[in-house]
Amino acid sequence: MKRGTMRSNLFPLLFAFAFLFSPVFSASDLILAKVDRRIDLTSQIVRITTSLKVENTGSDVVSEILLSFPENQAKHLAYLKATLGEGKGKAKTSSGVALPVKAVQPNDVPPALTIYSVSLPNGLGKGHSLTLDVLAVFTHILQPFPEKINQGDIQLLLFQESAQYLSPYAVKAQSLTLKLPDARIESYSKLENAKLQGSELKYGPYENIPPFSYLPIVIHYENNLPFAVAKELVREIEISHWGNVQITEHYEIIHAGAQSKGEFSRLDYQTRPYLRGASAFRRLVAKLPPRAHSVYYRDEIGNISTSSLWGDSRKTELEIEPRYPMFGGWKTTFTIGYGLPLQDFLFGLDGKRFLNISFGAPIYELVIDTIFVKVVLPEGSKDISVSVPFPVKERHETKISHLDIVGRPVVVVEKNNVVPEHNEHFQVYYKFNSLSMLTEPFMLISGFFFLFVACIVYSRADISISKSSASYLAKLQWDEVQATTQLIHGIISRCLTAHDKLETSLHDLSRTGDVQACKATRKSVDSSLKDLSKELKQPLSFLQSCPQAAQILPKVEELVTKERELQEKLVLKHTTVVDGYEKKLGGREIENRIASYQQKITALRREVDDLMDLIDEI
């Protein structure tokens, strides 16, 4: 998009702001003697630090100071903090103490303005003054322009603000300083008293500004720093009274800068990463507590080895690299886990224990759209309460883990639009009976004890079946029936082998015409079949006399009968063929004579094979 097009799109918006914030509301007797604003644009998080010297020119004591934000800023406001500095009147106090801040809506204030009230602990009397330091932190307020870029393009951003401080009070003198990442600026609003010095852009000083003055400015500048945004972060803090606090953080990260378009070339990126991937980020740095241990970094695939860990007595830093460079619109998910010493974070107070630990994520300059902080307390914890220094949503759950009976209570704290300034300590209070720590060891000891007792009882008890019992005797008889059946099965198999020898001798006779060799084979087979018939009598008699064999006996008897019929038909066939050869009959005539035998032999052999298979299965 051309620069002229950009300006034509912004002018109507700026004109609307100037019209909207015309003076319609005049505040009280307070005036701002001096306003110094400093805007940090060096990262994706915009931080506006404002120093207000407030004077009370009226006769009444003032108990609050109003801060105003335009609609385009208020919807991106993530963090607001006001502290007192030292003024030159009688209202002197120590700096650094945060004052109560709440949103209000006074009468006659434009609806597009969001007003916050800062409560003064002692009020501001007539003729007195004080210095109020205000820190406002904004997310997603920087607009990529252009919104889509190629791999080799730099990332340019738009920032809109007012050169004059927008306030319900009159301002005597004010100045504005914008800190940029570097000295490269595409364009900026060139107003009176505007000055660019290196990476700092200054507007002012401006004097005698009426309430709700608004002088719009736009800065179009380069910023290639990481725009890492966690769409969702689930941070689980599990307390073990055996000496450890286990932290597990599940991140869903997206590059929220200018969207990447076109193709990605890994070769170009590897050879010239700072030219062909200037807008991408390759690593993130997490600042962990100083005594963190057992640190791991992994994703759904497994452990990610592209990470570095170092530390000293004051901090532990973990540098992680995703599996691929993160360009605009690209996403990644990963998990960081580490352990912490329990004594550094768990304390006791008035009969209660409380966990004192930081709230936000340890990754540097990370914006979190939604964070869920889950504090898993030991089983048996009760009277649970949470103290967080800013508004959050709270609910309670139960987590079932190993050796749990009713589950562990879980406090879930949810907050949207989280920035590093939210990384303050919060407390979870609960009561816990120390004797409850013995529950799990007692369960383990009891489990092993009953296991050993069961083993002793099993090794000493005689659970075998008595040899005189009816079931044992029945089992022995059935085993004998099975063995006898297998014996008969083997004898029949040998008979069938003898049958095959007869068939083979007839085949050799048709090939060689040697009648004497065929008769010799017949004589040998007859002798074998006679012996096998004798062997078959005893096991068959046993089955006939055994009650346990009543189920299988009919099939065995049928098998024996069919085998004998088969044997007879084979002998008749063999005799007919040999006689035909001795009488020198033709082959066709011999085949005609044995045709009826052959059909019967084939059918019987099939029946015998089927019965053999059936008995084998039984």
Image: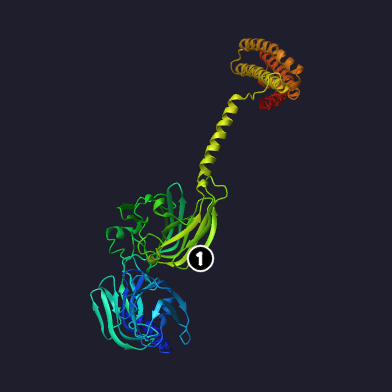
Residue at the location (64% across, 23% down)? 464
233 vs 488: above or below: below
310 vs 459: above or below: below
**x, y percentage for residue 189?**
30, 82
**x, y percentage for residue 112?**
45, 82
Work out which residue is located at the far left of the displayed protein and give it.
Answer: 197
**x, y percentage for residue 219?**
32, 78
What colour scheme governs how the chains and residues are painted in the rendered image of this protein? rainbow
- Is any atom of residue 519 visible in this view? yes
In front of the other: 138 or 330: 138
Crowd rating for badge 1 (residues with CA inside 10 Å; few <14, some 14–19, many 20+): few
Query: With 506 as the anchor, is 331 left or right in this view?
Result: left
In front of the other: 500 or 590: 500
Query: With 565 as the anchor, is 510 left or right in this view?
Result: left
In front of the other: 164 or 329: 164
Q: Quadrant of residue 603?
A: top right
Q: Where is the N terminus found, in terms of image quarters? A: bottom left
Query: With 537 as the anchor, is 105 left or right in this view?
Result: left
The total of numbered circles placed on residues is: 1
Q: Where is the C terminus found, in terms of image quarters? A: top right
Q: Quadrant of residue 489?
A: top right
**x, y percentage for residue 255?**
39, 64
In front of the other: 20 or 287: 287
Residue ID for mark 1: 393
489 vs 516: above or below: below
Residue type of the residue flagged with mark 1: Lys
Q: Quadrant of residue 318?
A: bottom left
- Is any atom of residue 144 visible in this view? no
Determine whether the residue tagged by mark 1 lies in a helix, strand or loop. strand
